[in-house]
Amino acid sequence: MDKWECMVCGYIYDPALGDPDNGVAAGTSFEEISDDWVCPDCGADKDLFEKVG
Amino acid sequence: MKHVIIGSGVAGVTAAQAVSRADPDAEIHIFGAEPYPYYRRPLLWELIAGSIETEAVFFPPAAWYAERGITLHLGARVDKIDPQNHQIRVEDGASIDYDRLLIATGARCFMPPCPGNDKDGVFTLRTLDDALAIKAYAAHASRAVVVGGGLLGLETARALQSVGLDVTVVEYIPYLLPRQLDSEGASVLQSILEEQQLHVITGAATAEILGDAAARAIRLQDGQELPADIVLFSTGIRSRIQLAAEAGMKANRGIIVDNELRTSAEDVFAIGDVAEFEGIVYGVIPAAIDQARVAGANMVEANSATYAGTLPTTTLKVAGAEVTSLGDCTADGAEFVSFRYVDLPGGKYRKLILRDDHPVGAILLNCSDQVRPVTQLIQSGVDLADYAEHIVNGEFDFSALLKKSAV
């Protein structure tokens, strides 16, 4: 599964880790995260992330 | 429709994204005074610290803009707005028409009027060029004084420390992070930082920077001299309101905007560090993003979104300390009641502030697992009158409190 990077602050979403503090279980691909999820570090919308492989 | 955005920072770029999302056929132009495309300001400390290369601050790639119908005009400083004729003028003389204009010119650093502040080695940190200049200068320096013990000052101090400098932070207020902490929480943080050899002097004002062409030391108002090859002022920001003010828009500290992020000029919007909403210039990224979302929608379709303010949230992460401040965290006065938990040896501190039994702010030091429940607690506006005992009896477990309040 691909990692995705926040273009605002540089946070990297790693599917292996998920974002459990915000209800995203480890193993969740970026595409599967709900659209109202935002960057846990800066609050950027999901569509402000770019795939970094 | 043609959208013109002045400013290529986080506010301008995220607004461009919001416009293109609402209208994929929109024509969008971003004018940036700096020669660089958008870069990530929060990474500038890592650049100074040497943990990333310059290229890593740039993101997204050029294709990102092209795919969204966004044209970048870099090194293009706008020097006039003509709202009557729906035009802006770029410094080289070109005039550009717009249907909707967004001002996202951000802020500049405030440099206090201190004798000697024009010497070599005296810096503020705002732009990539600032960061590169500091990094280059630091390579030949051994001691630094950071004036200003706020978030940015402490981040910069830590970055300079990590490249081997001996760093002292000087704060005018009697404690660190005066906008995020109270004195009790700040003393916990200060002891954590001092354990890591960061020197902290609070309640002190800078009188003068000493040296010939280059800074050699700073003298405090009590006469104490601190040797310093680098003096970095981190003493707040000032919104860049000049363009808007000259064009007749209402401005105070920032450009005054309504709850749709409109300025007083027709078809002109303002967001981010340059905008003032209900008396507040937020000056933080989450507010810029919230405002960009609303402004972008309204630029495409009038009255389609409203802005109700942003819960101010800031987090400082340094080795051994994670400080999060939420909402009205420094509120003081008869109408506020606060509950505190202090664990000095454990380096932990928590504080919840209530007004009329409703939580309005919190400070969390090294309690990162509590950030989310406390944020929800504040946003929900829940009445905590019946649960105050859970706080005062020492439990102070926000998660449990949230569950109880949900029943």
Image: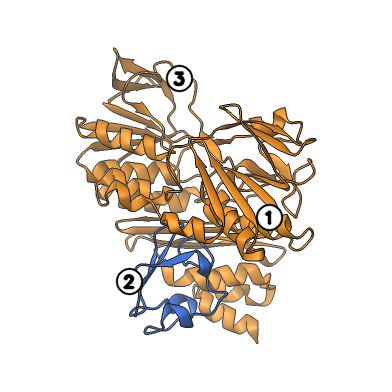
Chain colours: A blue, B orange
User: In x, y percent, where is residue B406?
Assistant: 64, 83
**Label 1 near label 3: C-beta < 8 Å?**
no
**Disc 2: host chain:** A
Query: Could you classify mark 2 by the number of other residues whose Cα lies within 10 Å: few (under 14), some (14-19), or many (20 or more)?
Result: few
Mark closer to the observer (3, 1): 1
Q: Find residue B295 and name its label.
A: 1
Residue drawn 40% across the image and 49% down it? B187
**Image position of A33 (left or right of B155):** right
Residue drawn 65% across the image and 87% down it? B407
Q: Tell me the amino acid under the disc marked 1.
A: Ala
Q: Where B64 sits versus B57, above or below?
A: below
Q: Is residue A29 visible?
A: yes
Query: Could you classify mark 3 by the number of other residues whose Cα lies within 10 Å: few (under 14), some (14-19), or many (20 or more)?
Result: few
Q: Is residue B197 visible?
A: no
Q: Tell me the amino acid under the disc marked 3.
A: Cys
Q: What quarter of the picture does the N terminus of chain B occupy?
A: bottom right
Residue drawn 41% across the image and 20% down it? B117
Give the structural element (helix, strand or loop) at label 2: loop
Q: Where B243 sits versus B27, above or below?
A: above
